[in-house]
Image (tube, helix red, strand yellow):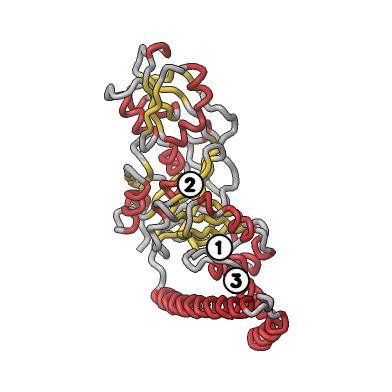
């Protein structure tokens, strides 16, 4: 059943007055919908997983502060969700305080850690006496100023009116032209994107053993592979001895180069899952444009209707998931056997790789699978002869 705008529900990282709320209000899908504020990224995603919201908007990357760890760590715990839209906003900050507060009396400043990174130099120059107090969001920092818990907050100027504050300084970001990337996430098969040909990016996410500082060499070797041209990998810490890997691949899954890159990545890192293919943001939305609804090319209100996937497609996808599970299990067994052979060969003074044997394997794959079989064989051989984190 198609839902009207007033029946749709969208969650976002709140409270009211965040850049994430601005990103959500910029898309046509959310026009006339009920917007639900969430205190954390995990809570926003839980709203979608439990059916309380149809989709949620979350920040994932800032051009100055980098990836948003809270979002990635929450996304990796939500395997049923995919990305359906992307929004990129230009980010400008103001210092908000209660009316009549001079800079000389500001002793504490609050805001999201990502905001603090982007205004650190300005704060050091203009309020060097102030202590930074991190908050779950910039709007939460503004609320703490309103309630007398803090002297000033770093937030968007648009948040001032909502919390009875006034901007004591605007444009305080250290780097001009900074942007933040946001992702609209939904359950598979619920929020329909009508024009799959518009998709030009595929993202993946998964856990990987080791802290980010320990993974540099492995990731460098991975990205240098010829299948991964144009692929970007970002990693943030997740717990004491693991990380979350977020991958952006150019193109969509039904395109050969993208499918090959995704397949190679999932063979190398079996825990990596696809978050779907979607259209990257066509342009940056500047602060002056946020008061009006943006209409990205190829998407209309009717096109963004919420609907269930057909039973036939769902059943076939379940079969594919089961087959993928079997394939991954078989590849892990092959990898284990290959490593043991390498150990025995090198232990006896031989080389780690048998080129004649690899030639035979390529021929077998090509004979069975056709022209593309050779590329599949290359991916399997590359995975089994290289190092993969335990």
User: Does the CB distance between marks 2 and 3 fall below 8 Å?
Assistant: no
* 223 up-or-down from 127: above or below: below
- Marks 2 and 3: which is nearer the front? 3
Query: What's the distance in space between the residues labelled 1 and 2, CA to CA?
Result: 23 Å
Marked residue nearer the N-terminal end (3 or 1): 1
Locate residue 199 relative to residue 163 in the image: left or right.
Answer: right
Residue located beneath label 2 in the image: 60
Q: Which of 196 and 317 is in front in this view?
A: 317
Other-residue count near label 1 (Cα within 10 Å), few / some / many at <14 / 14–19 / ≥20: some
> In the picture, which quadrant includes the N terminus?
bottom left
* 163 up-or-down from 204: above or below: above
**Quarter-of-image position of residue 192:** bottom left
Residue at point 41%, 11% (across, down) = 104
Locate residue 363 relative to residue 174 in the image: left or right.
Answer: right
Locate residue 314 relative to residue 122 in the image: left or right.
Answer: left
Q: Determine whether the residue tagged by mark 1 lies in a helix, strand or loop.
A: helix
Q: Which of 3 and 386 is in front in this view?
A: 386
Marked residue nearer the N-terminal end (2 or 3): 2
Q: Residue 196 carries which label?
A: 1
Query: What's the distance in space between the residues labelled 2 and 3, CA to CA?
Result: 29 Å
Q: Nearer the viewer, residue 100 or 289?
A: 100
């Amino acid at each position: 059943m198609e839902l009207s705008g007033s029946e749709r529900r969208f969650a976002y990282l709140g409270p009211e007055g965040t850049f994430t709320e601005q990103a959500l209000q910029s898309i046509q899908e959310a026009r006339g919908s009920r917007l639900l504020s969430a205190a954390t990224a995990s809570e926003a995603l839980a709203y979608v997983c439990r059916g309380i919201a149809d989709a949620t908007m979350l920040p994932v990357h800032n051009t100055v502060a980098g990836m948003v760890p809270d979002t990635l760590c929450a996304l990796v715990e939500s395997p049923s969700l995919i990305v359906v839209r992307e929004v990129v906003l230009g980010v400008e900050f103001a210092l908000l305080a209660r009316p009549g507060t001079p800079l000389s009396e500001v002793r504490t400043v609050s805001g999201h850690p990502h905001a603090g990174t982007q205004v650190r130099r300005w704060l050091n120059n203009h309020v060097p006496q102030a202590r930074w107090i991190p908050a779950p969001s910039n709007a939460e920092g503004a609320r703490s100023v309103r309630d007398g818990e803090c002297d000033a907050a770093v937030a968007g100027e648009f948040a001032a009116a909502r919390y009875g504050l006034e901007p004591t300084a605007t444009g305080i970001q250290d780097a001009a032209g900074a942007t933040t990337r946001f992702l609209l996430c939904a359950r598979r098969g619920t929020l329909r994107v009508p024009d799959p040909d518009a998709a030009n990016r595929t993202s993946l996410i998964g856990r990987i053993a080791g802290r980010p500082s320990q993974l540099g060499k492995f990731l460098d070797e991975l990205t240098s592979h010829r299948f991964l041209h144009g692929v970007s990998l970002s990693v943030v810490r997740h717990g004491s001895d693991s990380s979350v890997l977020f991958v952006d691949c150019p193109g969509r899954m039904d395109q050969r180069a993208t499918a090959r890159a995704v397949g190679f990545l999932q063979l190398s890192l079996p825990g990596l899952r696809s978050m779907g293919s979607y259209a990257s943001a066509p342009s940056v939305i500047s602060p002056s444009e946020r008061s009006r609804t943006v209409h990205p090319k190829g998407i209309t209100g009717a096109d963004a209707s919420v609907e269930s996937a057909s039973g036939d497609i769902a059943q076939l996808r379940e079969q594919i998931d089961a087959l993928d599970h079997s394939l991954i299990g078989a590849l892990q067994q092959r990898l284990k056997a290959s490593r043991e052979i390498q150990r025995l060969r090198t232990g006896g003074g031989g080389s780690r790789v048998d080129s004649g044997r690899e030639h035979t394997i390529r021929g077998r794959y090509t004979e069975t699978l056709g022209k593309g079989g050779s590329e599949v064989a290359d991916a399997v051989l590359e995975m089994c002869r290289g190092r993969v984190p335990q």
